[in-house]
Image (cartoon, helix red, strand yellow):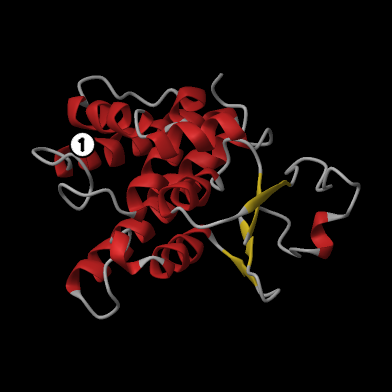
Amino acid sequence: MKLYYSPGACSLSPHIVLHESGLPFTTVLASTKSHKLPDGTDYYAINPKGYVPLLELDDGQRLTEGPAILQYIGDQVPDQKLVAPWGSMERYRQMEWLNFIATELHKVLGLFFNPAMPEEFKAPTRTRVAGRLQWVNQQLEGRPYLMGERFTVPDAYLFTVVNWNKYVNADTAGLNHLDAFMARMAARPAVQAAMKAEGLIP
């Protein structure tokens, strides 16, 4: 498999899960600014959407959208329980988290990376993000990961997106459960491997 990524972008989450899975894969840097690959290839020719992540399968098929890619990777290694079996309530709970992170955190935090975002929208948007993160903090009380004791694919997505808050500065004071989760995730070998590969940590 081949993962097209941009350092620190939402593609970090499947990068983490690929390391967790132990599956063989390669990576290709796809600039979200120039939309060019290191060899000069136009990324739009590979993904007309122009953004990451994109997972190219061994048979040449290409899969886009992070939540779909995360579940696909997890399904390739069912014994590792990175994602629950299809049809189980646990799977729907994981999908519930993936959808929440995508729509209520990813899309909202992502607005701050748009230089055209009006200043008057930033303060109320930060307030909205802070409220969502407070809710996540409550859900993490008494559990090390979103689904309980075991790491699953929504954890990688949450970690990736919450990391963006350092550029946004939404108020996270007192969110001790979320802070502990972020520290726990940062210590995972797969997270460290992915972040090192993307040049995010030494």
The amino acid type found where label 1 is placed reads Asn
The quadrant of the image that shows the N terminus is bottom right
Residue visible at 42% across and 54% down? Answer: 21
Residue 181 % position (x, y): 26, 33
Q: Residue furthest right?
A: 40
Give the structural element (helix, strand or loop) at label 1.
helix
The quadrant of the image that shows the C terminus is top right
Front residue (pair 103, 139): 139
Front residue (pair 138, 112): 138
Residue visible at 34% across and 53% down? Answer: 154
Query: How many numbered marks does the figure carry?
Result: 1
| Residues packed near mark 1 inside 10 Å, few (<14), some (14 to 19) or many (20 plus) | many
Q: Residue furthest left?
A: 142
Residue visible at 41% across and 31% down? Answer: 126
Residue visible at 37% across and 44% down? Answer: 158
Q: 193 above or below 20?
A: above
Residue 53 % position (x, y): 61, 54
> In the shown orientation, is residue 178 left or right of residue 153?
left
Residue 109 % position (x, y): 48, 39
Read off the residue under disc 1. Answer: 137
Report if residue 181 is visible in the image: yes
Tell me which corner region of the image, top left, top right, bottom left or bottom right, holds residue 6.
top right
Front residue (pair 79, 183): 79
Report if residue 121 is visible in the image: no
Q: 124 above or below 103?
A: above
Residue 95 % position (x, y): 32, 65
Q: 89 above or below 45?
A: below
